[in-house]
Structure formats: C-alpha cells, structure tokens
Image (cartoon, rainbow, N blue to C red):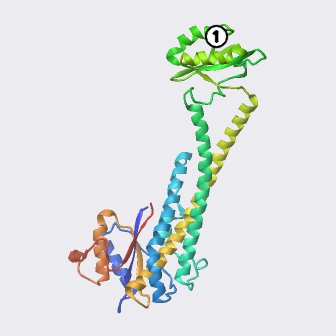
Amino acid sequence: MASRYWVVSLPVQGSTSASSLWNRLQEQISRHSFDTPLYRFNIPNLRVGTLDSLLSLSDDLLKSNTFMEGVSHKIRRQIEELERVSGVESSALTVDGVPVDSYLTRFVWDEAKYPTMSPLREIVDSLQGQVAKIEDDLKVRVAEYNNVRSQLNAINRKQSGSLAVRDISNLVKPEDIIQSENLTTLLAVVPKYSQKDWLSSYETMTNYVVPRSSKKLYEDNEYALYTVTLFRRVADNFRSSAREKGFQMRDFEYSPEAQDSRNQELEKLMRDQENLKSSLLQWCYTSYGEVFSSWMHFCAVRVFAESILRYGLPPSFLSCVLAPPTKSEKKVRLILEGAYWKSEDDVGSMAGLGGDADSHPYVSFTINLV
C-alpha cells in the first residue's frame, strides 16, 4: 500500500471527452511510468452555488484539509501505540471493512449521508463537525486511559525503587512484626556496605533493645531492610541514634486490611487498564474509518471547488488518483502537464514544462496516509 497519493484534475476542453482524456493519460502513464498506479476519482455533480461562495470556501479548504489529515494521523498513531503495548499484530486499517487504500482508489460518494444538492459549505461544515466530534471523543478516551496508566506507573515506581523510597508493605509479613503494650518492631534501611556495622551496633544504640532481634527481610542493589525489636518507650531514642550512624528508619505500621485494600486497588487498576486499552483500540479502528471517509468526501469537494475556480463553468474535468514512486514523480508531473496542454509529443520533449515543483497548471494536492 502506498502512503502518499496525488489527487489531480485535468480540464476536459473542446471536442475532447473525459473518456478519451482518461485513455490518453492511461496510455502515457503505462508507457513512460508503468510503476505508477492510476485510478479514476469519481466525483458526483455537486451543487456549484455562487462564485462568492466558492471563493469563500476556497479560502478554508487548505485549513480544513490540514485539520482532517491531522486527526486521521493522530488516531493512526494511537492505534500503532496501542498495538505495540498490547503485543498484537498490526491490523490493516479499513473503512466499513474496505482497506483504506482501496476506499481511496475506488471512492464512491455517499449520497445518503451527503446529498449532492446540499450547498458545498454545508457539506464541508458537516464533514468537519463529524471529525471534530471524533477528535473530542479521542481526547476524553485517551485521557481516561492515560489516567489509569499513570496510577499504575506510580504504584510500580513505588514498588520498583530502592528501599529508601519504595513501598515496603509487600516485603513485610505479619510474623516479622511484634506490636504489644511494651514491645515494638522498627524497620531500618541499611546501606549494603554497612550491614556489618548495623549488626554489631544495633543492640547498643539505646537501652532495652531485644538481643539478636534484628532480621534481614529484603535486599536490593543498594540497601538491605532489617527489623529490630525493642521496648516501645525507647523507640524515639533508637531512631535518633540510628540516624546519627547513617541508618534510615522507615515508618511502617502493618495492617492486613490496608494491604488487602492496596492489592485490590492494584488488581482493579490492572483490569481497568486492560479493558480501557481494548475498548480504546476498537474505538480507534472504527473512528479511523469514519474520519478517513469524511476526509475523502472532503477531498472530493475540494477537487470539485478548485476545478471550478481553475477551469470555469460548466464543470468539465477529469479527476484521478495516482501513487507515483518517488523516483518517478518528476516524469509523472511531465505527463500530467502534457495532458493539460494537450501535447501529443513524446513525453521526452516535455522537459521544459516542469516548472515549479509546487505550482502546476492543473489542480493537484497530496494525500498523506501516514
């Protein structure tokens, strides 16, 4: 599938018919740039309106196209990100089950949704309103998903940091803690290189420390977590002495209810994240198709309006879609200019017609799918 397409229109003038112009263009493309796919872009007879209304609409066409293209790319990037974090294989993006490249190259106007007798401004406003609503929905859904993901990331950071800062509730078991009227168990974070100092000194940091009561519960790359049991009335003195020696005392109160509540919260957040991720991905698949359809209908209006302003009335032009490889772009431009000027010379003699790469005598604009 190509990622870049040109939408162009050429005037049908004099005795030339759209069919004969199409046949000549096909013949030139196949002869001089056979690797360039070429398709008719079928645009219905839309309501022209007044010249003033066309000029007013023309002023907004580029801005509207940039907006719709931007929303489609935003949803596509969201899909790619969700597929990546979900570990699912990338799916071909579709419009009502039709791959987007096929939808573009075999475009059919939806008369039921966009009656061709409606004013062009009304059609464009309707298309832009639909895309704007989808963009607003996307922002809300992504914010909801990111909120849950941020909460989970915060919990994971607490559980994966060093012992000096991480949540230690899941490292401490009920049997590690003694809490009575007279006795209490404190938790100390000891630098790995200071463990011998801790074990040789904790019993003498204050009076009434239970001998041989310190037990190592956990160790990471920097610290070890130790318990120590002592009389409750000397706990503050012990904390002060330990800090003076470079040991960090962690405030901790064991509560089975609080631990269960934290575990339930974590499980709920994990379920919520998976559900939101799945529903957001499905919504993005569907919404991408809706935005892409709106964008292609807009492109049809744009070709029609620009062709009227460029070639005049009554509407008489051939619109088509091409996907030239980068190496063939200059050659294809020469072929299109040759068709515009009705030149029947060999394409090689058109070298002087190239002109400014961004300025062409015919209507032309680019659709970037990614």
| Residue 194 drawn at (x, y percent) | 52, 15
* Front in this rendered view, residue 267 or 158: 158
| Residue 28 drawn at (x, y percent) | 31, 76
Relative side of 105 to 281, left or right:
left
> Of helix, strand and loop, which one carries label 1?
loop
- Residue at 52% across / 47% down in the picture? 84
- On the question of residue 151 being in view, the answer is yes
Quadrant occupied by the N terminus: bottom left
- Residue that numbered label 1 is attached to: 206
* Front in this rendered view, residue 269 or 206: 206
Q: Quadrant of residue 364?
A: bottom left
Relative side of 196 to 261, left or right:
left
- On the question of residue 42 being in view, the answer is no
Quadrant occupied by the C terminus: bottom left
| Residue 106 drawn at (x, y percent) | 49, 72
Q: Residues within 10 Å of mark 1 (few under 14, many from 20)?
A: some
Relative side of 292 to 364, left or right:
right
